[in-house]
Amino acid sequence: MWSHIGVVFSCGCVHPVYLTRLYLVSGAGKKMLRHKADWQALLYLSLQTLLFVWQWLYGTHWVLYGTTLFLTLGVGCVHHNHAHLTMWTNRSLNRLTDMWLTLLQGHPTFVFHVTHNSNHHRHRHGPADITRTWRFGDTNHVVGYLLHPLQAFWVVFPCVIRWLRRLFHRSRRVFSYCLMQYAAVLVFWAVLAAVDWQKWILIVLIPQLFGLHWLLASNYLQHAHADGHSRINFARNFEGLINPLLFNVGLHTAHHLHGRAHWSELPELHRRYRPRIHARLRGESFTWYILKTWFLSLPMPQFRSRSLMRDAAQIDTVAETVEVHG
């Protein structure tokens, strides 16, 4: 039984030693990894894979499980970054990494191109962005954060289905590759559930759902109460420890304005845009933002978030009044 699990994890998830060996062999003649900073990404991917295997074979512990949940967030960032700019210069290694990420995260890599790169980054939280937070109410509180992934799913999933239907007629080869990612996840789940469904739920499914919720809900963290009509104030930025731990995920304005920039380049780009970003959308640590916005704001109104969309609407109303009576 354990040998089958070892095969699924080491082959299905693309064993990290294999990728490392490929890098070292080819590295003498050609640079295979685009940026050396992506060794951090490979470390997170490898550690999460090994933690899955270890906990399946030897049991879990709250420290190991907590580490797994954190790495799930980190691997979600890796997944997102890889969809924007692939980690390798070698196409085969990128395809292997696609599958590794797909199996670890429990959802296909290609969906980023459909709903994130082609829509969210193009429209930047504006009226045409199907995942704009203010589509479901211009809110910024813990209930909105918890609900946003469920709300976003109902608009994202039909978009993916429509895209796949069009792709079927345009390119059967790419269509097959996308379906292969879905099939790989389903087979992976089925094999593990058949071996031990309780372990599958605890060790694999729950961390994957936790990571998927973070992936979708991070849109709420980064855009709730930002101005969807602004060219610069459409995203919230966090500074502090979250960035070295989670691949500069907090530097969101620079990422939107330079979608193909590598995540390691975002601090320099952020410094360029920081003075132009509204004070309410920059400078805070992630922990302080969560503490004051979700919890301190309940008894203390001065900590409640205010929408820049409403501020923009008020400015427009004043401008129209001046124009009419001027």
Image: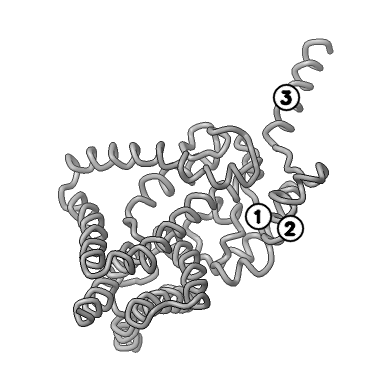
Label 3 close to label 2 by CB (< 8 Å): no
Q: Which residue is drawn at 58% across and 42% down?
A: 144
Give the alpha-carbon distance from disc 1 to disc 3, as whole Å.
25 Å
Give SS at disc 2.
Answer: loop
Where is mark 2, residue-wise? 283
Please tell me which residue is depicted at 38% across the width and 69% down the height of the picture. 203
Q: Residue 121 carries which label?
A: none
Q: Is residue 241 left or right of residue 297?
A: left
- Report, in whole angstroms, how far the alpha carbon at label 2 lies from the one at label 1: 7 Å
- Residue nearest the observer in this picture, 253 or 65: 65
Q: How crowded is mark 2: few (under 14 residues within 10 Å), some or many (20 or more)?
A: some
Q: Which mark identifies residue 237?
A: 1
Q: What residue type is labelled 3?
A: Asp
Closer to the camera, 274 or 42?
42
Amino acid beneath label 2? Gly
The amino acid beneath tag 1 is Asn
Q: Distance between the residues labelled 3 and 2?
A: 27 Å
Q: Where is residue 262 in the image (x, y as percent from the top left)?
A: 50, 65
Sort mark 1 into few (<14), some (14-19) or many (20+) by Cα contacts within 10 Å. many
Tell me the element at label 3: helix
Q: Name the residue under label 3.
A: 316
Do residues under tags 2 and 1 come within 8 Å of each other at their CB atoms?
Answer: yes
